Amino acid sequence: MPDRPAASVAERYDRAGLLAAVVVMAGWHAGFLLPIVIATWLRYGPWASCAAVWLAYAATGTASAVVLLRGRGHGPALPLAACPVLLAGVVTGGLAQPAGFFGSPNWPFVTAAFFALVAMWRRGIAALSAFLAANAIAGLGVLIALGQTDRVSIARFVGLCGGGALPLTLFAGSKLVTAMAGRAASIREELASARVAEQAAEAVQEDRRSRYETIRGTVTGLLRGLADGQLDPAEPATRQRIAVAVSRLRRYLVETDDVPDPLSHELRACADAAERHGVAVDLAAPAGQVPHLPVEVRRALTEPIITVLAAAATRARVTVVASPDHVAVAILADASLTGADRDALASGPGGAAEVSVDEEGGLLWAQAQWTGARASP
């Protein structure tokens, strides 16, 4: 899976764009405009310098940056609070010039767009465009109020309005990059999900193939022997082999069930198969909490139980004793095994569990126990 969801990637890119806008706004306001304000103050006085407007813009920009960088500013409150201050500064800056709108550096008209860029970062390009239009209308109103409506003044004013294209370009470019990054991350998520689904399907298919081979190995020889007459269903040994095969099949069928205690669930399936053949099985509740065990270990623990249940005459009792690093499954039944069957039972199914067998007085006792690293329940 990807390191970050698509939404998180888009959020990171959006925040990076916001930081860039804040840096541009702060650098323009402090690095470029502050010397102009000071020089104008010294030459024309505080009113012409628009020092109050500079301070109001600084406060507005700082508040906007703090709100947005804290993850807020999605509603209309921030633009509604910032825009009147910015437009008032545009009007004040235009009227404060001693020689008219273009007499000395009329910086509020152009600067307002950079502060609006930050304040409207969460509102979309339409809101920023609306502010730029309102800014142009406010500036045009100042021109009319000052009587500067000749063709040269209008042309210079249109040129100043073109300065709003830079914040608009920054905004549109940042949002485009954010959208592309989010889309790319979303595509990576989809590809990763598809790979995971493919791997899961392959795992399921491999599990089915393995189960099929196991089941075929269990019943193929038995069915072939019954078909060609090598096995007689009337013989006790054949019936015992059939009972073992049936119990194994029932165990295979429940191995993939989603249950809290798979081992007890599989022992219950084996006991049900024996009860269908007339054996009364007493399956006691586990003593202790059974840890999570792999299928191979569970098969090793249940295989001796299946063998003894198949040989039981009338009754059997199965017990389970468990701890986080040890599980023992024992059975006591009125059963009898031949020497070869008993040796095969005592040898254990593959070494995953240690098997002990004892027979006395017509009763057969067998126990399979597993000891491993401490596992979580």
Image (tube, rainbow, N blue to C red):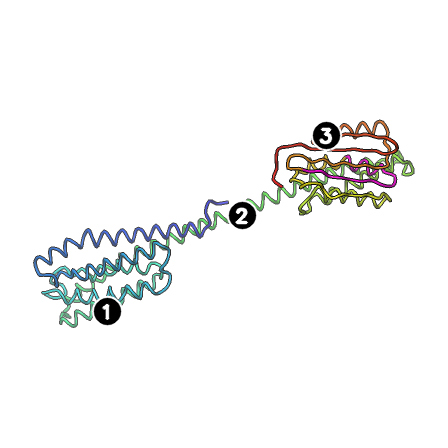
Of tags 2 and 3, which is closer to the observer? 3
Where residue 306 sits: x, y (%)?
A: 79, 38
Task: Identify the residue position indicated by label 2 in the image.
Answer: 193
What's the residue type where badge 1 is placed?
A: Ile
Alpha-carbon span between mark 2 and mark 1: 52 Å
Residue 354 image label: 3
The span picked out in magenta is: 304-322
**Vertical order, 25 against 225 (above or below):** below
Check the image and name the residue furthest to the right: 234
**Vertical order, 103 against 320 (above or below):** below
**Vertical order, 302 against 26 (above or below):** above
Where residue 19 sits: x, y (%)?
A: 31, 51
Q: Quarter of the image holding residue 107? A: bottom left
Q: Earlier in the sequence, mark 2 or mark 3?
A: 2
Q: Residue at x 66, y 46 (%)?
A: 260
Q: Secondary structure at mark 1?
A: helix
Disc 2 and disc 1 in contact, CB within 8 angstroms: no
Task: Identify the residue position indicated by label 1 in the image.
Answer: 137
Check the image and name the residue furthest to the left: 43
Residue in front for this viewpoint, 325 or 130 = 325
Q: Quarter of the image holding residue 104? A: bottom left
